[in-house]
Image (cartoon, grey):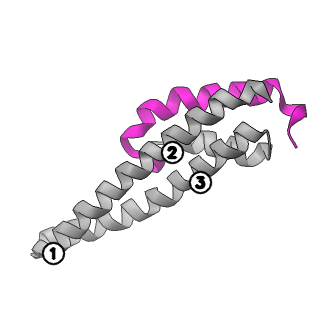
Amino acid sequence: MEETKAPGIALAVVGGLAILLQLVSIALGALALVQGGEAVLAQGIGQAVGGCLGLLFSGFIVFGGIKLMKGESYGLCMTAAIFAMIPFCTGICCLLGLPVGIWAIISMNKVKDQFR
């Protein structure tokens, strides 16, 4: 499906950028854990856990983008597009994820009956 190829690529790129952001967050959380101190320890644990959860969501967004490029699994692609628009799932990448997610949803709805 040509109509969903470009939004699928964009969705995968947003997910990839979010993965990089989450890896940085995990690294900073681990650095805070090494530095020690009670306040820093709690912050480091929270940042590392949040980064790991964000990493899972971001990976799902990349997977959804790949499926969207192939025109497979309408529900999975719709969920990935919605996740791309949520700040918790992508961090600061939601600034890109919001327009890309909307574009993906509009493109999917145009060719909904062609999904495998």
Position of residue 73 measured from the top left corner of the image (x, y, whole percent): 79, 47
Q: Are marks 3 and 2 in contact (CB under 8 Å)?
A: yes
User: Can you say whether 59 is above or below 111 in the image?
Assistant: below
Position of residue 43 measured from the top left corner of the image (x, y, whole percent): 22, 65
As measured in the structure, the alpha-carbon distance from the residue carrying label 1 to the one carrying label 3 is 30 Å
Give the number of the disc on residue 100: none
Say whether residue 104 is magenta.
yes
Q: Amino acid at mark 3?
A: Phe
The residue at 22%/71% (across/down) is 42
- Of residue 62 and residue 91, the one placed in the foreground of this image is 62
Kindly state the secondary structure of the residue where label 2 is placed.
Answer: helix
The residue at 60%/40% (across/down) is 82
Q: Are marks 1 and 3 in contact (CB under 8 Å)?
A: no
Q: On the image, numbered disc 3 is attached to which residue?
A: 60
Give the number of the disc on residue 34: 1
Sequence-wise, the earlier of marks 3 and 2 is: 2
Q: Amino acid at mark 2?
A: Gly
Magenta span of residues: 88-116
Prevailing secondary structure of the magenta residues: helix
Give the number of the disc on residue 15: 2
